Each structure stands twice: as structure tokens, then as C-alpha cells.
């Protein structure tokens, strides 16, 4: 009998997406008749704007889009993404520097696969989105965590990054606004990090998918625009999912130097070929249109953000910094770990999240999924009534801890 493993070591090492797993479990419990409220999924609760849907319907009727198209994206969409990038962040790129991908996750994977050789290190601020570590690992890279906590609003500074840098460091991952914390770097902080990276010849991979979801006095700053001295060592990841409520349409993109984009396009040509043409035409309508739809969503998210943060901070043992962007709160629950609750003593935020799902029928994602145990991520991209009911259930249950 063969002793060779059935599943390769490379793929066996991949963890399931914790956020999607929590969402799936919550939906399964709902389907079984339990009144679960889920704070797990990171997607707007709004429908895709009507004009985007109409563009897709029209495209589906056009025989041109029934055939293969260029692997790197429809030329008209690439041009529109370049124009949108100049409009929204002031960063000038050519269409040849754009690769259209099957959602933001493929852009993340292809960026790291194109830049990293085995052993190359990537500085990643923790808490981090669950997909980054797996993409870095698959590319043969080594993730080096730079841990930020609630004392700094989950922001990392140049000093921390410099302390983590070695001769193997090739890339710094810069994410603002952040998933899972909602942290937003100021222009000054962004410039400082960008100039430090440029000084040391590092690449910057920046995920800008939440660029339009900032609140209060916070402003989105593209590191590519703010630090021109980065030159051709910056790669931008983005997509239509969050801005236009199009998570299921699966259209993202990667912007970078022509040689990097050409190499990533070669990879995509073998991995998936072109993104669905119908979805690409929907994305073309989205990025070419105005931002009125996102303004409406942002207003609702801002209202929910304030409600959620206020309610969470009223729970004994919970501390929640105010998120400035995206649609997540990231409260610390470290004071509750080890306390007795309904006859149990959860020893981790993962165990506490499991208890909450069973006892309060509320789904949250534990901090273990994001590299920092002792926290929860709660999305406030759900209806106002469900939000209040869900956090009220949390408060009622957690108030019993002793």
C-alpha cells in the first residue's frame, strides 16, 4: 500500500475561512428554525444597485460575452478601473497596469504568488483578515506578525515595523481601512510608513477595498498616491464587493507595475482564464457610475457603527475602540476569559464565541481567526433591528459572567 499522502502538504496546511465557517454555521442553525443573529459575514445587507443589475442583464443577451475574452480583463473595464482609480485616489495608472480578478481574494493570492519566492518575509499587522496568511503561505512566503492592540486603536507604527524587519523582508502589507478592526491610518501615518518602506526598498501591497467606507473625521489615504517615492514597488488590491454591495459577483482587481501585472495575468490565464463577462460588465457599470449608492450605505453603516460601539462598551468586561472605517467592530473580551458563564469557564475567545452561539444564538467571529486571541469581530452590515437585538442578547448573557 502506498504511504504517499492523499492530500498535498501544501493544501493540507490551508485553514478554512473562519468568517465563512461562522456564517455557514449560523445560516444552518437558522435553516433549522433557530433565531440566530449573525455578525460574522463581511458583506453589505443592501442589494446591488439596479443600474448595475441592468447592465448585467444586457450583457447576458449580447453574444459577444458568450465567448472567451482576454484573461486579464475586458479592455473597457480595465480602462474604467484606471479612470476610477485616478478619480477616487488621485493615482494615475494605465489600463495595462490593471488585472481583473475573480473577486478580491484572487487578487490577494496572485499578488503574493507573483512577488514572493520561498522564504521571503511579509510584514503583516495583526489583527489581519483571514485570507492573507493562507495566500502568503501558498506562495512560499513567511508571515511576520506586527501586533497592534486596542491601546493604539489597532494601528502599527514605523518603530514596530522596523523592529520586525530583517534582511529577508520583501513586502509590507498595508490595509486601511482595516478588516477586522475598522482602523484607519491618518495621512501622516500613511506617509511615514510609505517613506520607511521606500527607504528600505520594500514592496508595499495595499488592500483598498474599503476605501469608500470611512466615518466621522477619518479620511482614506492611498499610500500609492501619498508616497510617490515608492515608485514601481506598490501593488493595489481592490474590487466592487464592498463599495457596490456586489460580494457575490466576484470581480476584483490588482494594479501594479506592468511587469508584475503581466506575470500575474500569465498565472491567471492558466488558473481561471477570464472573469465572467457578465459580471465584468456589471462591474463596468459600477465603477463608471457615481458614488450615490455607497453614500446611502455609508450613512446606514455609520448609524449602526455608533449604536454597536455604544452598546458593546456598556457590557461589563468588554472594551471596544471606535472603528473609523469598513463595517466591523473589534471589541476586546479578554476580561471575560476564564470567568464562569452558564456553568462553563471558556478558556479562549473561540470557546466563548461557541458558548455565545449556543446560549444566545448570536454568531461572532473570535479573534483567533485574525491572529489575536481575546477579541471578537462583529460586522454591523446587518439591519438595525437585528443589530440591537443581537448585541442585547450578548449583553444579557455576558452580564452573567462571574
Image (tube, rainbow, N blue to C red):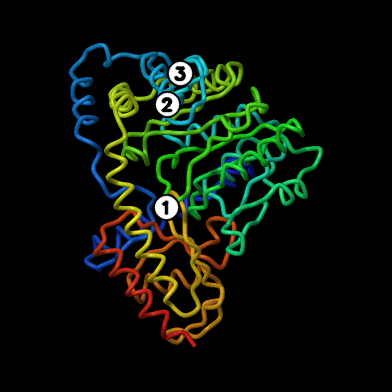
Crowding near pointer 2: few (<14 within 10 Å), some, many (20+)? Answer: few
Residue appearing at x 52%, y 38% in the figure: 221
The residue nearer to you, when weighing 285 against 70, is 285
Marks 3 and 2, how far apart at CA: 22 Å
Q: Give me the disc on residue 216.
A: 1
Residue corresponding to mark 3: 72
Residue appearing at x 53%, y 50% in the figure: 15
Total labels: the figure holds 3
Is residue 130 positioned above or below 385 on the image? above
Residue appearing at x 45%, y 35% in the figure: 104
Lower sequence index among marks 1 and 2: 2
Crowding near pointer 1: few (<14 within 10 Å), some, many (20+)? Answer: few
**Foreground disc of the pair 1, 3:** 1
Lower sequence index among marks 1 and 3: 3
Q: Is residue 277 left or right of residue 3?
A: left
The residue nearer to you, when weighing 105 against 343, is 105
Is residue 123 positioned above or below 356 on the image? above
* Secondary element type, mark 3: loop
Give the farthest residue toward the front.
217
Q: Is residue 396 left or right of residue 313?
A: left
Marks 1/3 in contact by CB < 8 Å: the verdict is no
Give the farthest residue toward the top.
64
* Secondary element type, mark 2: helix
Residue corresponding to mark 2: 87
Crowding near pointer 3: few (<14 within 10 Å), some, many (20+)? Answer: many
Residue 117 in picture, x, y percent from top left:
70, 31
Residue 12 in picture, x, y percent from top left:
57, 46
Marks 1 and 3, how far apart at CA: 37 Å
* Secondary element type, mark 1: loop
Quarter-of-image position of residue 309: bottom left
Residue 359 in picture, x, y percent from top left:
36, 77
Amino acid at each position: 500500500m502506498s504511504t504517499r499522502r492523499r492530500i498535498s502538504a501544501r493544501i493540507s496546511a490551508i485553514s478554512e475561512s473562519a468568517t465563512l465557517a461562522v456564517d455557514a454555521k449560523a445560516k444552518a442553525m437558522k435553516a433549522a428554525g433557530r433565531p440566530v443573529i449573525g455578525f460574522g459575514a463581511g458583506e453589505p445587507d443592501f442589494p446591488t444597485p439596479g443600474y448595475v443589475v441592468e447592465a448585467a442583464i444586457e450583457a447576458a443577451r449580447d453574444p459577444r460575452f458568450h465567448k472567451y475574452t482576454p484573461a486579464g480583463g475586458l479592455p473597457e473595464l480595465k480602462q474604467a478601473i484606471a479612470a476610477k482609480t485616478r478619480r477616487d485616489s488621485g493615482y494615475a495608472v494605465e489600463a495595462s497596469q490593471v488585472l481583473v480578478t475573480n473577486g478580491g481574494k484572487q487578487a490577494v493570492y496572485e499578488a503574493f504568488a507573483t512577488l514572493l519566492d520561498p522564504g521571503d518575509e511579509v510584514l503583516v499587522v495583526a489583527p489581519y483578515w483571514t485570507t492573507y496568511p493562507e495566500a502568503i503561505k501558498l506562495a512560499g512566503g513567511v508571515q511576520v506578525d506586527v501586533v497592534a492592540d486596542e491601546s493604539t486603536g489597532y494601528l502599527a507604527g514605523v518603530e514596530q515595523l522596523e523592529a520586525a524587519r530583517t534582511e529577508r523582508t520583501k513586502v509590507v502589507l498595508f490595509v486601511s481601512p482595516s478588516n477586522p478592526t475598522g482602523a484607519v491610518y491618518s495621512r501622516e501615518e500613511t506617509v511615514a510608513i510609505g517613506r520607511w518602506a521606500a527607504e528600505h526598498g520594500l514592496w508595499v501591497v495595499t488592500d483598498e477595498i474599503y476605501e469608500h467606507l470611512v466615518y466621522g473625521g477619518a479620511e482614506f489615504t492611498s499610500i500609492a498616491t501619498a508616497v510617490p517615492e515608492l515608485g514601481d514597488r506598490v501593488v493595489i488590491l481592490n474590487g466592487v464587493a464592498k463599495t457596490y454591495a456586489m460580494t457575490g459577483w466576484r470581480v476584483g482587481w490588482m494594479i501594479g507595475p506592468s511587469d508584475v501585472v503581466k506575470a500575474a495575468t500569465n498565472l491567471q490565464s492558466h488558473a481561471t482564464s477570464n472573469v465572467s463577462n457578465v459580471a465584468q460588465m456589471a462591474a463596468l457599470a459600477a465603477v463608471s457610475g457615481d458614488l450615490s449608492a455607497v453614500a446611502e450605505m455609508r450613512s446606514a453603516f455609520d448609524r449602526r457603527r455608533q449604536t454597536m460601539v455604544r452598546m458593546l462598551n456598556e457590557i461589563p468586561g468588554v472594551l471596544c475602540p471606535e472603528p473609523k472605517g469598513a463595517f466591523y467592530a473589534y471589541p476586546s473580551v479578554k476580561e471575560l476569559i476564564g470567568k464562569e458563564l452558564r456553568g462553563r469557564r471558556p478558556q479562549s475567545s473561540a470557546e466563548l464565541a461557541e458558548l455565545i452561539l449556543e446560549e444566545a444564538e448570536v454568531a461572532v467571529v473570535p479573534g483567533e481567526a485574525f491572529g489575536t486571541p481575546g477579541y471578537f469581530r462583529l460586522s454591523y452590515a446587518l439591519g438595525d433591528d437585528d443589530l440591537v437585538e443581537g448585541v442585547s442578547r450578548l449583553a444579557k448573557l455576558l452580564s452573567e459572567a462571574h
